[in-house]
Amino acid sequence: MISTRFSGLDGVSLESAKVAEVLEAAGHHVAWFAGELGDSFQPGMVHSRAHFETEANRQLEAACFGTSTRSPEITNALRASAEELKEPLRQFLRDYRIDVVIAQNVLCIPMQLPLGIALTEVLAETGTPAVAHHHDFFWERERFMVNAVPDILGAAFPPVLPRLRHVVIHSGAASALHNRRGVDPTVLPNVMDFERGPVHPGDGERFRGQAGFRPDDIILLQPTRVVPRKGIELTVDLAAALNDERVKVVITHPEGDEGHEYGTFLRNRADQLGVQLCFVPTQPQHTAADTDALLLPDAYAAADLVTFPSLIEGFGNALLEAFFYRRPVFVNRYAVYVSDIAPTGVRCIEIDGAVDSLAVGQVRELLADPAAWKAHVDANYDISRAHFSYRVIRDRLLPLLEDAASTNPVPA
């Protein structure tokens, strides 16, 4: 597995861990390469310059996006950075005797241009079979549309190589990739282990106690990172419309991946509307270093309502988590929800880009009688087991890997 970062609660890290779990259960051995590796992403190689948050990479990103031309110096810097990354990638392939590479989002979203260039060239030069697991394409993000690197995006985001298979996470991405690159990818949606269910269903009282909430507080759980496309201001608007001092908007994931301006905007908006906005960092599970950490399963168990008002999503990992932990959901009808999730028959409280009186009324009814939603959350779980379980990985990804591994790669 190769990416810029495997750590924390971002969707790519979470989905990569699930893929690895299925691969290992099928008898494969997984090794990891990235600029940052969390404790659970081992064994592997960390090469710090592969991270997207380095100062050098941030400077390259600023020089390449939001403008239509680049200087020769930037071209040379991109080339030099890519060359510097190629030898660590080759060493990783050698040291871990890699048979097949899975490129996790690093060949589609250009947050680390040199790494995308380097990996494309290493795959082309070595002939190593690979699967590119695409979670987000640059053409899906407004901030990448004006750019000075169309040549690089066309060559490496994503590349088309003889031994590279492509996997996307929704049907719209499959159509777009076919139209832009002439390849027919496999659709692999985000998944949860709905066949087994939660190993730890979560302790809501524990979360409320540790985070300082009262038993009668109403928790609107926003289990996402603090980035603009998550539409968290819509959750703030919902809380304001409920006009109940017990309502707390609880954000569980970090801010900073795209700067701190959005977090400041949310705090100001919440202050203006009289909404209590609470940032409560959580972890997916205990670590040896922090056994008292607040846990994401406990946060879901404590939630009166999970809010997922995203404007744009690659798929919607937090939405599946809400179904997994059998919580009711308030959702904005973003494109992938409309095309790939809602048609399965799941039941959510929906809005179209703005909080309306109908949705507020539905939330009030839910909060007044949570038991009335039990049938809906149970049905959402059963539907998800049919459409978004680990079986989908076994059925769609394992055959791709077996096919790729049956070729004879050129030694790195």
Image (spheres, grey):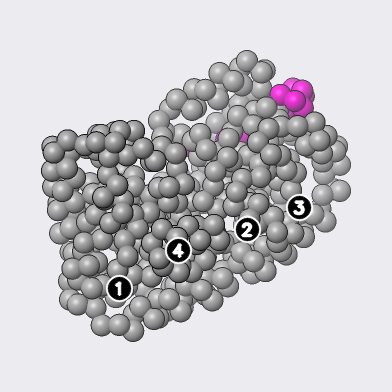
Image quarter in which the C terminus is found: bottom left
Q: Which residue is mark 1?
A: 162
Relative depth, front residue between 104 and 146:
146
Nearest to N terminus: mark 2 or mark 4: 4
Q: Alpha-carbon neighbours of circle 4 within 10 Å: few (<14), some, or many (≥20)?
A: few
Q: Position of residue 312 (x, y in %)?
A: 54, 43
Measured in 3D between alpha carbons, the distance from the residue under mark 3 to the one under mark 2, in whole angstroms, is: 14 Å
* Picture quadrant of residue 181: bottom left
Relative depth, front residue between 77 and 316:
77
**Magenta highlight on residue 248:** yes
**At label 1, which amino acid type do we have?**
Pro
Q: Which residue is mark 3?
A: 347
Magenta span of residues: 240-254
Q: Which residue is mark 4?
A: 178
Measured in 3D between alpha carbons, the distance from the residue under mark 4 to the one under mark 3, in whole angstroms, is: 31 Å
**At label 4, which amino acid type do we have?**
His
Q: Which residue is mark 2?
A: 340
Would residue 71 be found to the left or right of residue 109 on screen? left
